[in-house]
Image: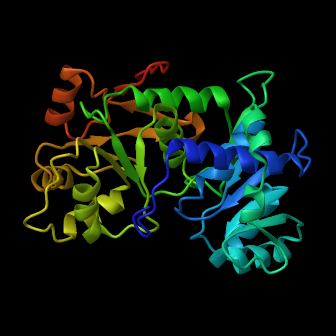
Amino acid sequence: MVDTEEEQTFHSLLEDCIRVAINLNNDDFQDDDVLGLCTGNHKETCVPYIAGLFLGIKIVAFDTSISIQDNVYLLRKITPKVIFVEQNKLTDVEESMHLADVSIKLVVIGDDAHDNTLFSDYLDASEEDVSNFEPVSLKSNKETAAILFSSGTTGLPKGICLSHYGLLNQSLLFTFSGLYGSSRQPVSMSFGQLYWISSVIFLMSTTLSGIARVIKETYEADKVWKIIEKYKVNLIFLSPFQCLDLNRSSKPEDVNTSSLYVLGCGGGPLSEKLNSSLRDLLPGTFILQIYGQTEVAGASTMFQMRKVDEQLLSYYRPNSVGRPVPGFWFKVRR
């Protein structure tokens, strides 16, 4: 965690996720119940998400930056049984619940829960219970794992149900696409919240493969350079607007970004001019455009960086979003 310089091992993370899962069992979730999340990028953010997956509970995340009115609409569309919420968004969530006329148990990540439950209470479980815990066995991996909201391009956001199978396939795709180069200890970084499919896939792929994640609460372009150098980041994923801000920021003359193998961009097109400028700022780094949709659980086209011919294509065709990923078929029509 960049802001606090905290570190956490995968073993410690696993135990936290199990402890939260054990306590979620006490909330008596039924098949149609949903677990919610409303928190930015913190060390604890992924814990309830993974814990919910352990129990086969459907999960939905809310964007902390959207308005109360938008939250009201989303809460009426999908009403979780429990929401894990960061302390500084608690008032907004409570007001949104009041306006939406819904009743939801709130678990607060912070020190002051008001009249709600503290997140620390969900970390209370015996060592025996933790060691004996086993995730649920799903009847089918085609069951819904998470519900994400569409971006609203063609109208108001819609809830999109994504299966365990779809999320796992995308996670493995990112794990084995060669995005980290030859690094023996890969390090990744992205700034999106779990409201976005890209962040969900990055969380799952890094967790499955033991890749370190560098977490920062907010995106500050002028600080990214030093973060890349300090943590030897191999892969960073940014939106087009973040790429633009990075390009406009002042890169320190003495900063070393040689560890960065791929800068991935998704969520919108990256102009050839901006692509070229980023290459100049990040010599030796592949600038990779990825095309995908929430509806397909992530990427549908991208270059496989483990293949030399696709590395070359990504360089000589900067406007391209790559080739279809395994499992996708395309039809070209006039």
Q: Is residue 160 in sight in this rendering?
A: no
Q: What residue is shown at x 15% (from left), y 28% (from top)? A: 312
> Residue 147, position in %: x, y?
69, 45
Q: Please tell me which residue lies in front, 319 or 177.
A: 177
Q: Please tell me which residue lies in front, 104 or 45.
A: 45
Q: What residue is shown at x 77% (from left), y 38% (from top)? A: 55
> Residue 75, position in %: x, y?
78, 62
User: Which quadrant of the figure has residue 142?
Assistant: top right
Look at the image and tell me in which quarter the C terminus lies: top left
User: Which quadrant of the figure has residue 326?
Assistant: top left
- Name the colour scheme: rainbow
Look at the image and tell me in which quarter the N terminus lies: bottom left
Q: Above or below — where is 279 with respect to 290?
A: below
> Residue 83, position in %: x, y?
76, 61
User: Which quadrant of the figure has residue 231?
Assistant: bottom left
Left or right: residue 60 compared with residue 212: right
Q: Please tell me which residue lies in front, 155 or 316.
A: 316
Q: Above or below — where is 270 with respect to 172?
A: below
> Residue 272, position in %: x, y?
19, 49
Q: Above or below — where is 315 with respect to 213?
A: above
Q: Is residue 317 in sight in this rendering?
A: yes
Left or right: residue 311 compared with residue 304: left
Numbered marks: total = 0
Left or right: residue 196 compared with residue 143: left
Q: Please tell me which residue lies in front, 231 or 271.
A: 231
